[in-house]
Amino acid sequence: MAGIAIGTIPALAGGLVLKALNIELDAPLLIAIMAIAAALLLGLAEKIGIRKRGFDQLQISDGILVGLGQMVALLPGASRSGSTLTAALFLGLKRETAARFSFLLGIPTLTIATLVQTGDVISNREMMLPMLVGIVSTFIFSYLSIAWLLKFLQRQSTWIFVWYRIGLGIALIVAIAGGVLR
C-alpha cells in the first residue's frame, strides 16, 4: 500500500505543474510519436523483462519507479496503464502483477484528477446528473475492462497492444500527412 501511495505522487505533481503552467499538449503529431514510442518501450519490456516477481514481492522503490512511468502518461499518446505496465515489466514483475499494480496505482491518481476536474462542474447544477452518470458508467466499464485484462494477461503477452499502438501512431501520421489532422 505504501508503494501505491508513493507511486501516486509523481503523476499528481506533474499534473499540477502542467495545470499551473497551463500547458496544452494535444498536438496530433505528439500523440502519434508518443503512441509509437510507448509501444516500442512496451515491446522491449515484454522482450527483456524477467517477469518473476509477484505482488507479495513489491517494494516501495517499485512504487516510485512505476509512479514515474505513470507520470509519462501525462503526455498525450502515452496511456497511463501502458506506461505503468511497461515500467513494471522492466522491473521484473509478472504480467498479471504488473497489470494489477498498474490499476491499483491508477485508483488514487484518477480519483484525485477527477475531483480536480469536477470542481468546475459542481458549480453548474445542470451538469451534475451527466457527471454522475459518467462517473458511475466509467467505474462499471473500467472494472469490467480491468477484470478482462487481468485474465488476458495471465495467458497472453502484451504484443497485441504493442502492434495496436504502432498501428494507431502510423495511422495518425498518415492522417496528418494527408491533411485530415492538424
Image: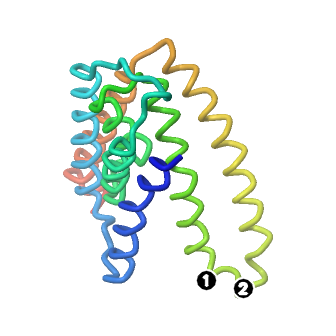
Where does the C terminus fall, quadrant-wise?
bottom left
Q: Nearer the viewer, residue 65 or 177?
A: 65
Identify the secondary structure beneath mark 1. Answer: helix
> Would you call the spot at circle 1 few (<14 residues within 10 Å), some (14-19), or many (20 or more)?
few
Label 2, label 1: how many angstroms apart (C-alpha)?
Answer: 8 Å
The quadrant holding residue 87 is top left
Q: Nearer the viewer, residue 153 or 162?
A: 153
Mark 2 element type: loop
Q: Quadrant of residue 157?
A: top left
Amino acid on which disc 2 is placed? Asn
Q: Where's residue 39, x and y in %?
A: 28, 35
Q: Which residue is mark 1?
A: 120
Please determine whether, in this image, residue 148 is positioned above or below residue 168: above
Farthest residue toward the top? 155
Label 2–label 1 contact, CB within 8 A: yes
Quick one: 179 or 86, which is closer to the camera?
Answer: 86
Between 91 and 44, which is closer to the camera in this rendering?
A: 91
Mark 2, residue position: 124
The local crowd at label 2, few if under 14, some if 14 to 19, many if 20 or more residues have their Cα within 10 Å, is few
Residue in the picture at 30% in, 67% down? 25
Q: Position of residue 79 (x, y in %)?
A: 39, 47
Which residue is outermost to the bottom?
123
| Residue at screen point 39% across, 78% down | 19
**Identity, as a three-letter code, of the amino acid under mark 1:** Asp
- Residue 48: x and y, percent? 21, 21
In the displayed structure, does residue 168 sit left or right of residue 116?
Answer: left
Figure check: 99 above or below 61? above
- In the figure, 133 relative to 174: above or below? below
- Which numbered marker is on residue 135? none
x 27%, y 31%: residue: 90
**Residue 42 drawn at (x, y percent):** 29, 32
